[in-house]
Amino acid sequence: MTENQFDVVVIGGGPAGYPAAIRAAQLGLRTACVDAWVAPDGSRPFGGTCLNVGCIPSKALLESSELYHRAQSEFAAHGIEAGSLSFDVGKMLERKRSIVKQLTSGIEALFKGAGVTPIHGRARLEAGNRVEVDGPDGKRTLEATHVVLATGSTPIELPVAKFDGERIVDSSGALEFTEVPKRLGVIGAGVIGLELGSVWRRLGAEVVLLEALDTFLYMADQQVATEALKQFKRQGLDIRLGAKVTGAERRGDAVSVRYEQGGKAEEIEVDKLIVCVGRRPYTDGLLGPNTGVELDERGFIRVDDHCRTSARNVWAVGDVVRGPMLAHKGTEEGVMVAELIAGHVAEVNYRTIPSIIYTAPEIAWVGQTEEQVKASGRKYKTGVFPFSINGRAKALQQTVGFVKIIADREYDDILGVHIIGPMAGELIAEAVVAMEFSASAEDLQRIIHAHPTLSEALHEAALAADKRAIHALNR
């Protein structure tokens, strides 16, 4: 092979693309990974949205802001007198950037270790599985036996609230505020809106979230959503449901936001406005003529259950295809595709993909909600156990929330697990493993859980499904 010939060329270096490239190289395939990302400082790190301006930096800010909030509101109960507290936004951002740099720089080291060829530049798929790359060193043409499309997604921009990069920003811009806005508006009370709203609320901003839907967290189990709404309002987040934004415009150093709610025209003025109404697949300039790759009506690349596109030896993974826009979902698809290309048997179980909202309390779930199970007509049972009577939660002084398990009434299969409370994002892993191996509620009941741990709440919820809970009333 020449330097431009590869067994596999992956277009996109985010959490779907770079694992696909690493796994393909591990399996002995000559692999290149092409990425177009350019950081504000001119560097070209791999990692995509997730590592650069998404999952990782947002969690860093959430951790910093939560520690500050807990120091203000909870430390005294532990006997810790913190005195007068102050917060340095600049240091918080510096810490966030340091974490991002550590993780993104690590990817090229992983590439070197696995034998992946990293290529910087904007890639375009042409007919015959040729990949045209326009990079900092000029243009080159790659020839590939297989091509994996992993170009991710980009924030949706509202026609009535255009981004200006200063006062009206997307989720990436909200990670770079150099000072705490006095008044912050957020369009969209979904995962991203709640997380970013929480960061700046904890640091002192007055936060209003405008959600067009009448149902809060429609994708979550509604028992969890009801508890979450109560807790977020208690924290001072002003969440307005059924609020359809009709316009947003700058007025000096402020933004005027107009919306309709309950048939009435309303208006608020904020210092910053974050637009978080979802993301769209990013395929701009990706496909040349006659590639044979088809898009659906929403702009996603059409794929089958194993991420094959309509074109021979062209695959697509991650946010650019159907399914939840989650980094871990994209990672598993990338690994699956690499293994299929190498002739292995591989699949992704889309029924056991966990979802997490990293607010406080955290929210996590896997499988079906109670509403979905009920709509299916399947007979079921539920078990709920509150953290308020869990010993470890009390020691942590984080007793808000509960674990909820939904199981088939006759066969006892676990259909869904929903958690709101401390470390929900970590606890959900046990539920994912249980469902992946077709465990029953009784299986969870019979597994010994260490004491005192938060995981005991999962154990007790499983027991409660059969009215066997030891540390709670069985209703």
Image: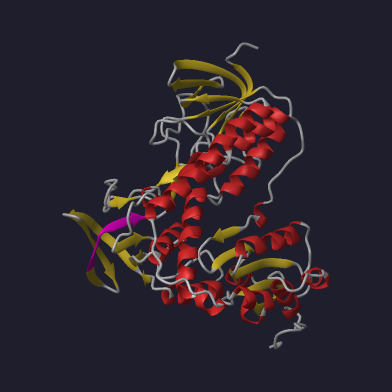
Q: How many marks?
A: 0
Q: Is 53 contained in the magenta span?
A: no
Quadrant showing the C terminus: bottom right
Residue that appears at 72% across and 30% down: 26
Residue 132 image offset from top left, x and y in percent? 48, 20
What main secondary structure does the magenta stretch of the protein show?
Answer: strand
Tell me the quarter of the picture where residue 182 sits.
bottom left
Judging depth in this view, the residue of 184 and 412 nearest the camera is 184
Residue 277 image offset from top left, x and y in percent? 39, 55
Judging depth in this view, the residue of 467 and 22 nearest the camera is 22
Residue 164 image offset from top left, x and y in percent? 26, 46
Judging depth in this view, the residue of 79 and 7 nearest the camera is 79
- Residue 298: tell me if it is visible: no
Q: Is residue 339 above or below residue 390?
A: above
Residue 384 image offset from top left, x and y in percent? 66, 78
Quadrant showing the N terminus: top right
Residue at the extreme top of the image, as rendered: 2
- Residue 463: tell me if it is visible: yes
Q: Is 270 contained in the magenta span?
A: yes
Tell me the quarter of the picture where residue 198 sits.
bottom left
Q: Is residue 75 left or right of residue 453?
A: left
Residue bounds of the magenta highlight: 267-276
Residue at the extreme left of the image, as rendered: 252
Q: Is residue 471 left or right of residue 311?
A: right
Residue that appears at 68% across and 30% down: 24
Residue that appears at 34% across and 48% down: 157
